[in-house]
Amino acid sequence: MPEIEHIPFEEPLRDFPPVTLEEMDSVKLMNRIDTKYLTSERILLELLDDAYKAGYKVLVIEGLRISPYNTLYYDTAELRMFQDHHNRRLTRQKVRTRSYIASGISFLEIKRKNNKGRTRKKRIGIPSSEFYDFKSDTDATDYLARHSAFTADILSPVLETRFDRITLVNANMTERLTIDTCLSFRNIRSGVNASLKDAVIIELKQDGRASSQMKNILLNHRIKPVRVSKYCIAVTLTEPGARCGRFKPKVRWIEKTINKKITVL
């Protein structure tokens, strides 16, 4: 994966009150609204300062306030899932394996978006040894067949994504903020690597019935909502043969936001 010097966020997070995964998951956001944002690491430092002053807590897993993730996206030979997104198909899916590196836990995950814009995620645990190939796992392949329009025999690994995640929760447990930094990609098929430099992808998950203090904080830092898919941006950067004209302006917008040119290796 490409290397870049990143801002260390461990120190700004040290004084945040901790929250456990069990505490956070005990409160379900029944009327959830998800909104994505994109900014730079420099602006993130300022946002974290405001979040601390506003009483936000940080998720701590295995003693870590920043958790490394590894995700592998699967697709058909024709990249049908990527093309469904590119062609603005309202009902679409993504299939991936995800490893929570700190805990050593891995899942096969299926993300489905319906024509109302709502996203639902289903997942089943898999051994970490099956992260790159789950097809020999009957439970996983049966689960995929039940919950997806795709079967394991027509899918293969396409894109590996690594990033570090910070999760903040407000005091009332009515909203969660995932903050992904150090985003880097490896295309399994083309062998091309890329990274988003010091870009930061933020996702706000909020209870639609409650006011959002974080929305105001984001607005104060001129961080605006954006539609961005890690998988689609990564394929655009690393798959020379893919039809990705719709996503190229988004890459240029990311470059403008972080004031850096995104390069591939």
Image (cartoon, rainbow, N blue to C red):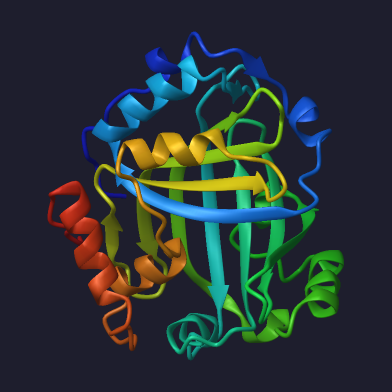
Q: Residue furthest top?
A: 15
Residue 159 placement, left or right of 143: left
The residue closer to the viewer here, 222 or 81, is 222
| Position in image of residue 5 (x %, y %) | 21, 33
Residue 164 visible somewhere in the drawing: no
Q: Tell me which residue sits at (49%, 81%) in the image.
A: 85
Q: Tell me which residue sits at (39%, 13%) in the image.
A: 11
Q: Tell me which residue sits at (61%, 16%) in the image.
A: 63
| Position in image of residue 263 (x %, y %) | 16, 59
| Position in image of residue 156 (x %, y %) | 57, 76
Query: Is 54 drawn above or below residue 29 in the view shown?
Result: above
Image quadrant where residue 261 sits: bottom left
Residue 14 visible somewhere in the drawing: yes
Residue 233 placement, left or right of 130: left
| Position in image of residue 149 (x %, y %) | 73, 85
Q: Tell me which residue sits at (78%, 36%) in the image.
A: 25
Number of numbered tags placed on the structure image = 0
Image quadrant where residue 57 sits: top right
Where is the C terminus found, in terms of image quarters?
bottom left
Residue 174 placement, left or right of 6: right
The residue closer to the viewer here, 105 or 20, is 20
